[in-house]
Amino acid sequence: MSEERFIDLESRLAHQDHLLDQLNDVVTQQQAKIMQLDELCKSLIQRIRSMGDDMPASDPGDERPPHY
Protein backbone atom coordinates (compact mmCIF):
# COMPACT_ATOMS: atom_id res chain seq x y z
CA MET A 1 0.00 0.00 0.00
CA SER A 2 1.40 3.35 -0.98
CA GLU A 3 2.03 5.97 1.64
CA GLU A 4 -0.31 8.42 -0.11
CA ARG A 5 -3.17 5.90 0.09
CA PHE A 6 -2.37 5.21 3.74
CA ILE A 7 -2.49 8.93 4.55
CA ASP A 8 -5.83 9.20 2.71
CA LEU A 9 -7.26 6.31 4.76
CA GLU A 10 -6.04 7.86 8.01
CA SER A 11 -7.60 11.17 7.02
CA ARG A 12 -10.94 9.50 6.24
CA LEU A 13 -10.86 7.61 9.52
CA ALA A 14 -10.20 10.80 11.48
CA HIS A 15 -13.06 12.53 9.66
CA GLN A 16 -15.42 9.62 10.39
CA ASP A 17 -14.40 9.62 14.07
CA HIS A 18 -15.19 13.32 14.24
CA LEU A 19 -18.59 12.81 12.60
CA LEU A 20 -19.35 9.93 14.94
CA ASP A 21 -18.59 12.13 17.95
CA GLN A 22 -20.86 14.85 16.58
CA LEU A 23 -23.68 12.37 15.96
CA ASN A 24 -23.27 10.98 19.46
CA ASP A 25 -23.59 14.49 20.90
CA VAL A 26 -26.78 15.10 18.89
CA VAL A 27 -28.31 11.79 19.98
CA THR A 28 -27.44 12.54 23.62
CA GLN A 29 -29.04 15.99 23.39
CA GLN A 30 -32.14 14.53 21.73
CA GLN A 31 -32.51 11.90 24.43
CA ALA A 32 -32.25 14.55 27.14
CA LYS A 33 -34.91 16.63 25.37
CA ILE A 34 -37.18 13.59 24.97
CA MET A 35 -36.90 12.85 28.69
CA GLN A 36 -37.65 16.51 29.51
CA LEU A 37 -40.71 16.51 27.24
CA ASP A 38 -41.89 13.20 28.69
CA GLU A 39 -41.79 14.67 32.21
CA LEU A 40 -43.61 17.77 30.98
CA CYS A 41 -46.36 15.63 29.39
CA LYS A 42 -46.77 13.63 32.59
CA SER A 43 -47.03 16.84 34.59
CA LEU A 44 -49.60 18.32 32.22
CA ILE A 45 -51.67 15.12 32.25
CA GLN A 46 -51.69 15.17 36.05
CA ARG A 47 -52.72 18.85 36.11
CA ILE A 48 -55.54 18.25 33.63
CA ARG A 49 -56.79 15.27 35.61
CA SER A 50 -56.73 17.25 38.85
CA MET A 51 -58.61 20.11 37.19
CA GLY A 52 -61.29 17.67 36.08
CA ASP A 53 -61.65 16.35 39.61
CA ASP A 54 -62.13 19.88 40.96
CA MET A 55 -64.83 20.86 38.44
CA PRO A 56 -68.45 20.43 39.45
CA ALA A 57 -70.56 18.03 37.44
CA SER A 58 -72.41 19.94 34.74
CA ASP A 59 -76.10 19.68 34.08
CA PRO A 60 -76.61 17.70 30.85
CA GLY A 61 -79.46 20.07 30.02
CA ASP A 62 -76.90 22.83 29.47
CA GLU A 63 -75.00 20.89 26.82
CA ARG A 64 -75.56 21.44 23.13
CA PRO A 65 -76.81 18.46 21.13
CA PRO A 66 -74.06 16.66 19.17
CA HIS A 67 -75.46 17.70 15.78
CA TYR A 68 -74.53 21.36 16.36
Image (spheres, rainbow, N blue to C red):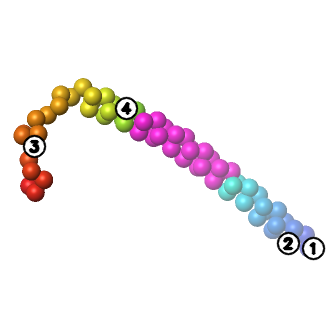
Q: Please state if 58 lies on the left or on the right of 32 as rendered.
A: left
Look at the magenta stretch and give its main secondary structure: helix
Give the mark, 2 or 3, whose residue is nearer the N terminus: 2
Q: Secondary structure at mark 3?
A: loop
The mark lying in front, picked from 4 and 3, is 3
Of helix, strand and loop, which one carries label 4?
Answer: helix
As shown in the figure, which amino acid type bears the numbered disc 1? Met
The residue labelled by disc 4 is 46
Residue at the spot of label 2: 5
- Of 62 and 23, the residue lying toward us: 62
Front tag of 1 and 3 = 3
- Which residue, as the protein is rendered here, is positioned at the far top? 54
In the rendered structure, does residue 45 fall within the stretch colored magenta?
Answer: no
Q: Which residue matches tag 3? A: 63
The residue at 8%/55% (across/down) is 68
Q: Is residue 16 above or below residue 64?
A: below
Q: Which mark is residue 1?
A: 1
Q: What segment is highlighted magenta in the picture?
A: 21-42
Asked whether disc 1 touches disc 2, contact meaning CB atoms under 8 Å apart, the reply is: yes
**Distance from the alpha carbon under mark 4 to that under mark 2:** 61 Å
Work out whether mark 4 precedes mark 1 in sequence or the reverse, and give the earlier one.
1
Q: Is residue 13 left or right of residue 20?
A: right
The residues bearing labels 4 and 1 have C-alpha atoms spaced at a distance of: 65 Å
Q: Amino acid at mark 2?
A: Arg
Q: Secondary structure at mark 1?
A: loop
